Amino acid sequence: MKKITLALLVLFSIQSCKETANPKEKIQAQTAEIDRTVLPILEPTEQVFTELDARNAKAPKRFEVKAPEKAPNVVVVLIDDIGFGHSSAFGGPIQMPNLERLASNGLKYNRFHTTSLCSPTRMALLSGYNHHSNNAGAIMEVATAFPGNSAIRPQNISTIAQVLKLNGYSTAAFGKYHETPPWEGSVSGPFDRWPTGSGFDKFYGFIGGETNQWHPMVYDGTTRVYPNVEDPNYHFTNDMTNQALAWMNTQQSLTPDKPFYMYFATGATHAPHHAPKAYSDKYKGKFSQGWDKLREQTLARQIELGVVPKGTKLAPKPEAIKDWDKLSADEKRLFERQMEIFAGFAEHTDAEVGRLMDALEERGELENTLFYYIVGDNGSSAEGGMIGMFNENTYFNGVQETLDMQLSKLDKLGTEATYNHFAAGWAVAGNTPFTWTKQVASNFGGTRNGMVMSWPARIKSKGEVRSQFHHVIDVAPTIYEAAGIPIPKMVYGIQQRPMEGVSMVYSFDKATAPEARKTQYFEMIGNRGIYHEGWFAGTIHKAPWEAKPRKPLTEDVWELYNVNQNILKNWKN
């Protein structure tokens, strides 16, 4: 009786398995029609096999999440603390031939905006959500427990790296990563908000706002490493580029059909301005005309290049910035050298980006790579004050440097013996044609940055300018649309908030396409602004070199501009 019962159970089990097993066609359909809005992508229901003879059993196709067919590689290059009017591609005096080269093969965006400060821009860039949504109201180092400024990215916002990784991409970050709360930046962790905890398979760089380019504090993943800084040719930008090329070459050699996403964020040109001497010396005598004439020269080139409209006038520079022709000979001598070093720093950075472009081209990958070259995470920095600094840490500690102190170090500027920053007048000149600088979110001098985008396989327009109003949060949805990946609704069981960025793909083929971004707010350290359909309202609450706000928030004076018609109206709260 027991044997009969056991036999019946076995037969019943086999029959049940046959009835519940998915047909081969259903398995294939599940694999082909995966739901990419829910991440991680769910694996198909396992097929049940009843064949006992291994010779007759046929293994199913291995389930693997792959990126959509022909999805491009994605490279996002982000330069630090450089202004709209610094690079040659946007009319500036600093030669950046690789930026120009990319622009000649793609599009130049002349109304692209950032948040006016490092961490907030980066959090917004890497996610597609505004900086306060990311709890990055300011840099990580001044975070509080209040919503909007806690430095903790909420769980209902996922990074581009997380989304692409879960959709079959390899992901890597190199250089500066200023998105980790400082109290989590040690061996004690937690490491959830380090790059490798935020979707990047690989990270090589530094955690924090800046580093010594000659003696950087470098991590590989979450492990402290020690590059050979005794090499006389060592410079961190070279080092991070070497690491990026090694990773990309290995990834492509092993998995050539798998696209990759690379975030390449240089520490340059943030202070300290550490430049190889050969690059800085190329600019000797190039800035003897001073910052006032340089603004005029830059504007003329910008009009010629079409990156600002004909008839554009220079905005007045801040009253605190002295006229160049009223400076002493010693001041001019110091300030000239400061700008020569900064220019060398920027050109050297562009050369390293060029190495990355060359490597992509040599591998035949540049054609199908969506390449962003974002020239600044904010406007140029005026944190050097009125005379600059030979040691930027004096700024953070409230120590006032003197002209004589700096002149005594003049021949050392840019080397490992200094931690230098230039005078604010050069920042204003670098943000031509605008008035203000980094930190000032209520003026385009703080928020407008040049941006070049190239994707030869898709963008057929070459060397053209696009003038639609866009913001750094628009990078993420552009990448998703380009890759054929939907914006996720659910990630690791957590409902995601609606995307705040808008895709820029619509602008690829038509220069006159109506802009998709109708409204965008700006705020940093009380400096507030808002854009809506061609109008911009803003108020200056505090200048970077001022110790305290000019007025209480409720008494700030606002200005209203029609940025399409250059109409100015003043109004108060």
Image (cartoon, rainbow, N blue to C red):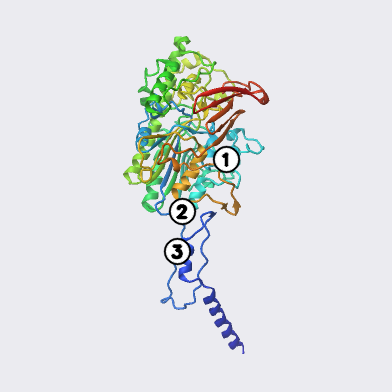
Q: Residue at x 55, y 35 (%)?
A: 520
Marked residue nearer the N-terminal end (2 or 1): 2
Q: Which residue is mark 1?
A: 186
Marked residue nearer the N-terminal end (3 or 1): 3
Dot 2 amino acid type: Gly
Circle 1 — which element?
loop
Which numbered circle lies on residue 168? 2
Asked whether disc 2 touches disc 1, contact meaning CB atoms under 8 Å apart, the reply is no
Dot 3 amino acid type: Arg
Q: Nearer the viewer, residue 456 or 191?
A: 456
Marked residue nearer the N-terminal end (3 or 2): 3
Label 2 crowd (10 A; few <14 / some 14-19 / many >=20): some
Asked whether disc 3 touches disc 2, contact meaning CB atoms under 8 Å apart, the reply is no
User: Is there any visible trace of residue 434 in the rendered image?
Assistant: yes
User: Is there any visible trace of residue 557 in the rendered image?
Assistant: no
**Distance CA(mark 2)–CA(mark 1):** 30 Å
**Distance CA(mark 3)–CA(mark 2):** 14 Å
**Distance CA(mark 3)–CA(mark 1):** 40 Å
Q: In the rendered view of the protein, which quadrant contains the N terminus?
A: bottom right
Q: Residue at x 59, y 49 (%)?
A: 496
Q: Nearer the viewer, residue 510 or 314?
A: 510
Give percent across and percent down for residue 118.
53, 33
Q: Which residue is mark 3?
A: 62
Label 3 crowd (10 A; few <14 / some 14-19 / many >=20): few
- Left or right of 103? Residue 200 is right
Give percent across and percent down for residue 454.
39, 40
Q: In the rendered view of the protein, which quadrant contains the C terminus?
A: top right
Question: Which residue of the protein is positioned furthest toward the bottom in this rendering?
Answer: 1
